[in-house]
Image (tube, rainbow, N blue to C red):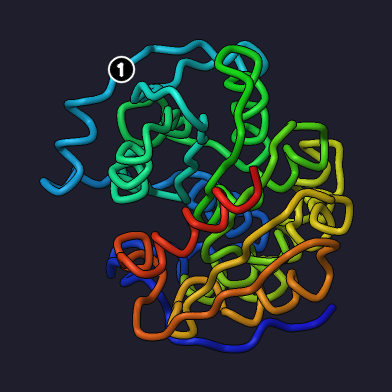
Amino acid sequence: MKKNKKQRPAVRVPKSIRFVVWLSQRISNALATKVALYLFFRPQRFKTPVREHQMRDAAEQIKFYASSIQKEIQVYRLSGKKKKVLLLHGWSGRGTQLFYFAEKLQKENCEIITFDMPAHGQSPGNKTNVLELTCCIQDINQKFSPFDAAIAHSMGSFALLRAIKDGLPLQSAAIIGSGDSIKGVFYRFSQQLHFSEKITERMITTVEKQFGTKLETYSSSMSIKEIDIPLLIVHDKDDKEAPYECSITLHDLARNSQLKLTSGLGHHRILRDSKTVQHIIQFLFQHP
């Protein structure tokens, strides 16, 4: 397997977690694998910053039952009469994290739908995965369709591309800071927490047995090969969570894509950069 390029860890790992990781690997591979999977599927839940309050308070808030995964999720809806746009956040994020997109799209009289993934934001639970997120997108589409376009960030991009591949009807889409390989996400997680490569391989094998599918079938690099709609791929060269080379790979594999690389914005600040946001919105409107 092609190894991921080493990069500076994107998160600071508490000493207590580092100790548990070290100790579990000293005791047994089986225990270390259980610890790794426990941590891997549990996102961090952060307090909503003040800059997102306006969108949260202005939106119609809907408790939506995603029947395909039997979980309740928090949906936010902003009314409009033109395009209907779906916004998807990333791991450990919130639907309102894409507030700047919502603000600019509202000025264009667009309707906005976004939601907190299971175990994120105001949605209950403490663990989830990309398969559940993909199911949520399909359930949201059944309830609120038709959507004209979608914008996804980070892990949300994996799920969006898979959903489009599986038949989600859109006229255009944009992905921001996406990885290219699901297995790569596992390896970067292990690198940050200092799990060994053997434990990473055990994690992947365990998850594939549990879900009954090969993880790579949910990789962006697999989904994008079968997508025909216009797709804008955006990535910052200083992203410490997902290497920008992932987006170059995706662009090379895509049938109908444009690539925009930025600098100095990182993984999250890119969502609030006015030039980048405007570029993405213009792309969506150029492909009605």
Q: Secondary structure at mark 1?
A: strand
The image quarter in which residue 75 lies: top left
Q: Nearer the viewer, residue 74 or 229?
A: 229
Q: How far from the left and from the top, in percent, is residue 153?
A: 50, 54
Q: Look at 63% across and 88% down and name the residue there.
A: 5
Q: Quadrant of the C terminus?
A: top right
Identify residue for label 1: 61
Residue drawn at x 72%, y 54% is 230
Residue 145, percent from left and from top: 61, 19
Q: Quadrant of residue 259?
A: bottom right
Q: Quadrant of the N terminus?
A: bottom right
Residue type at mark 1 is Gln
Q: Considering only vertical position in the picture, is 249 above or below 20?
A: below
Q: Quadrant of residue 254?
A: bottom right
44 left or right of 59 in image = right
Farthest residue to the left: give it: 50
- Counting the numbered discs, the total is 1
Pick whichever, 157 or 22, lies toward us. 157
Residue at x-position 15% and y-position 49%: 51
Check disc 1: other Cα within 10 Å, few if <14, some if 14-19, many if 20+. some
Q: Is residue 133 left or right of residue 213?
A: left
* Relative depth, front residue between 50 and 22: 50
Q: Residue at x 60, y 26 (%)?
A: 136
**Side of 11 where 23 appears, left or right:** right
- Residue 190's place in the image compared with 172, above or below, is below
Locate residue 272, reporting x and y percent: 30, 61
Rendered location of residue 50, percent (x, y):
11, 46
